[in-house]
Image (cartoon, coloured by chain):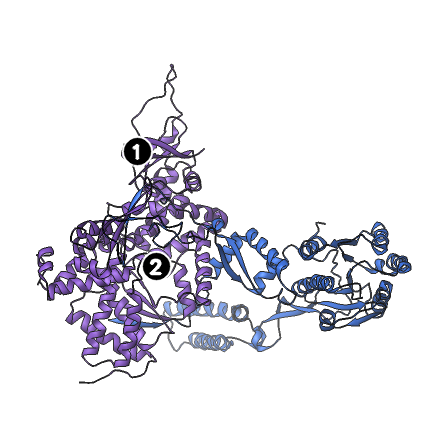
Chain colours: A blue, B purple
Amino acid sequence: MSHFIDRRLNGKNKSAVNRQRFLQRYKSQLKRAVTDAVNRRSITDVANGERVGIPSKDIGEPVFHHGPGGTRETVHPGNKDFLSGDRIQRPPEGGGSGSGQGRAGRGGKGEDDFVFELSRDEFLDLLFEDLALPNLVRNQLIGTNEFKYARAGYATDGAPTNIDVVRSLKGAIARRTALGAPHRGRLREAEAELEALLAAGADETDARVLALREEIDRLKTRLAALPFIDTYDLRYQSFVKRPEPTSKAVMLCIMDVSGSMDQVRKSLAKRFFILLYLFLQRNYDHIDLVFIRHHTIAQEVDEQEFFYSRETGGTVVSSALNLAHEILTERYDSQDWNIYAAQASDGDNWDSDSAICRDILVSRLMPLMRYYAYVEITPRQHQSLWYAYQDVRAAHRNFAMQEIGGGEDIYPVFRELFKRQEV
Amino acid sequence: MRNVISESSEWTFPLLERFDRELARLAHDHYRLDTYANQIEVIASEQMIDAYSSVGLPISYHHWSFGKQFVATEQTYRRGQMGLAYEIVINSDPCIAYLMEENTLPMQALVIAHACYGHNSFFKGNYLFRTWTSADAIVDYLVFARNYIARCEERYGQEEVELLLDSCHALMNHGVDRYKRPAPLSMAEEQRRQREREAYLQLQINDLWRTIPRIDADGNGEQEARWPEEPQENILYFLEKNAPLLEPWQREILRIVRKISQYFYPQRQTQVMNEGWATFWHYTLLNHLYDEGFVSDGFMMEVLQSHTGVVFQPPFDAPYYSGINPYALGFAMMRDIRRICEEPTAEDRAWFPDIAGGDWLAVLDFAMRNFKDESFIAQFLSPRVMRDLRLFAVADDDREETLAVSAIHDEGGYRALRQALADQYNLGSREPNIQVFNVDRWGDRSLTLRHTRYNRRPLAENVDEMLRHVRRLWGFPVRLESVDGEGRVQLVGEQR
């Protein structure tokens, strides 16, 4: 007799553990693949999942098997015009009527990659592994509105849903034991007395017997009247709100969109910022992002405009720095906020402006900053801004600068800037 | 006489049960098939992929290689490069078969006939399965294995266990007893014995290794006969029992891998027969239902379309040719046996005097019970099938410039062709013959494996990698020698 079972509602992800183990095991290969992928991709789809390939030979599961050579006889179907004794040219390697010993992945094309798809999360996990915002300080803030509920023992009142049954019943037992103890003691005595009297030959109508019997009844009633559970016994699980120390952070993204930034450089800068954006989004729940772009004048924009609109004009970097400072003094008190900034530019600037930039940074911005990262996208000679910024770096340890030559530099430079720093 | 069960192609549980009843009636009463009870489970396609990745076992321990399998299957399935099999069936008692939710009613009926009556009766009847596997205990044993390995991972670390499993998996094909019947498995028994083994091993001091090598005054080590006395073909078993440095839990894991390998051993030897048998029965049973009027023309068309897809054999020069399709060969042979019994020709009478004109059910039953692929082909492949499939044999000798067509489907070639095809399914010639040959007990404790070359075939180039795995299990140097047809011994690889 057959027995039918509907298993469709059973778990589907039986293999999730095995899949994770597979990814774990080939992490280094996967990381390489992810890096390659980031360098190849256009801006918009960095955040999608990715097909990655690992060389098949790296993940093989070896077994003893025969290699080519020796003699073998194989039988094939579909003979058309062969006769016994015909000689045939050896087919090229991996050809159709192969050795019959052929193993998956070893035909013709040489080393195939084992290609598969990573989910977006898996992809980004690998991409941003070991990266962190430097110098982040968790400050316990007065007036913060971040709370977390934490258990805090038991309380005598609360919502019915929070009744702790075991605790309450334990209390009830204790109460019944305590309140009943004197009566039970007396009851035992009275029963012993009664038994002694009866044993001594006292009559059922004897006054002492009657009195004892009455007392025993009374005591039993008293004991039975003790409530099994009383409101007094109820215990509730207690939760308290605790303020959570939070790290409030703001990231200023400053990008040069002047005419000297040609399309290629703009797209490099944008890719840098997209990486940064994904990284922040992924790792930190509460980060404010401020987007500032500038040519001769600076503007605060939203992310859509920051990444996708076009601008041209000359370049005055200090305009952006001034705007940044304004925004910070207005909205982000450095006592409460961890302040970060990333700036991308091609290094072009009004000659006289570079010195101003240096002064703004050294005296006004850097004291507020946890970390300031500057990337210069230029394959050429550095200009005045780079040298001015070198002075800043000399003055402040939390100032970092790197240059990006082309698309393949973006990810390594990004990693360099945000790699987890050992304290 | 039309009493069609359903015109719809949507399946429901009552309909499945109805079909199962009819198929069971035909299979048991009409065709005298002997089966285990069926447990038919309906699953979704994701679950099918899950089932695939644990090599078709209903439950298995965790290992990255199953994850890799899963990723690969999911990938090809999603890109539409591969359809999933319609069913997976497990050699257990009751016999577990999975049906996919997405299948239409005709497909479900086909799968029930194929798996629950075809494969099922094969598992119950074939001598290899009867000898080597214990259908009633396998699921229990897998539960034991999974729990045991999970416990080891907790205790000794996931990485440690994983490395060990890697090495065991590499030697899995060499963890099979080919001639001895293994003891039956059951979970309770296995757990008890496992504890016993462990306790015993903890107590025991291995005499073999206690002795410091005794060197005579004149510097000659005590010369002993070779040990083990007879070469051992079951390398995993040998390591489990004799590797000096393994902990008890490691030996237990070797044993688990060995047991699972042993469980699959009959399946590897009966591909053609098993699939041919199941295909023959779904074809026969469903045609019978059609003749009785239980299913409509449309239903039968769908069944036949899928059936022909399964038994299609592309010719050798087709771009998607990948060897002989076991379904096609098996089905053709099973059908041919029936034909030989029912309508024998003069040729059949000359080739198969014993069965020509006999009772086809009895002959098929005999064939199913007592053969494996190799002997089945050697015994039953008829000239007719060779002609139909237009088989030809090609001899490849690396000492010669060209390949030679050694036999074709003609009078002079039938016997040679049949022998060549049977040999192709001989596991003994497909897999290299490697045995434990010697242990240098008085010297460096090194282990020597010997590969006996078959038709001068060398081992593939991954010998060093493989020896590293053996080295990991053995704990001392390992070397591999190769013996050719003339008995010359040559060192192939060594891991110190």
Q: Residue furthest bottom?
A: B2
Question: Where's the C terminus of chain B, which quadrant?
Answer: top left
Viewer-nearest residue: A251 or B196: A251
Q: Chain of mark 1?
A: B
Viewer-nearest residue: A196 or A280: A280
Q: Is residue B62 left or right of residue B22?
A: right
Q: Secondary structure at mark 2?
A: loop
Up the image or down, B63 lies above or below B401; here it is below
Discs 2/1, front:
2
Residue on which disc 2 sits: B321
Q: Is residue A396 left or right of residue B347?
A: right
The answer to which quarter of the image holds residue A78 is: bottom left
Up the image or down, B283 lies above or below B170; here it is below
Residue B36: where, in percent of width, then height?
A: 23, 64
Residue A365: where, in percent of width, then height?
A: 85, 60
Q: Amino acid at mark 2?
A: Tyr
The answer to which quarter of the image holds residue A299 is: bottom right
Residue for point 28% across, 70% down: B307
Viewer-nearest residue: A22 or B348: B348
- Res A71 label: none
Spatial separation of the CA atoms under disc 2 and disc 1: 45 Å
- Res B228 label: 1
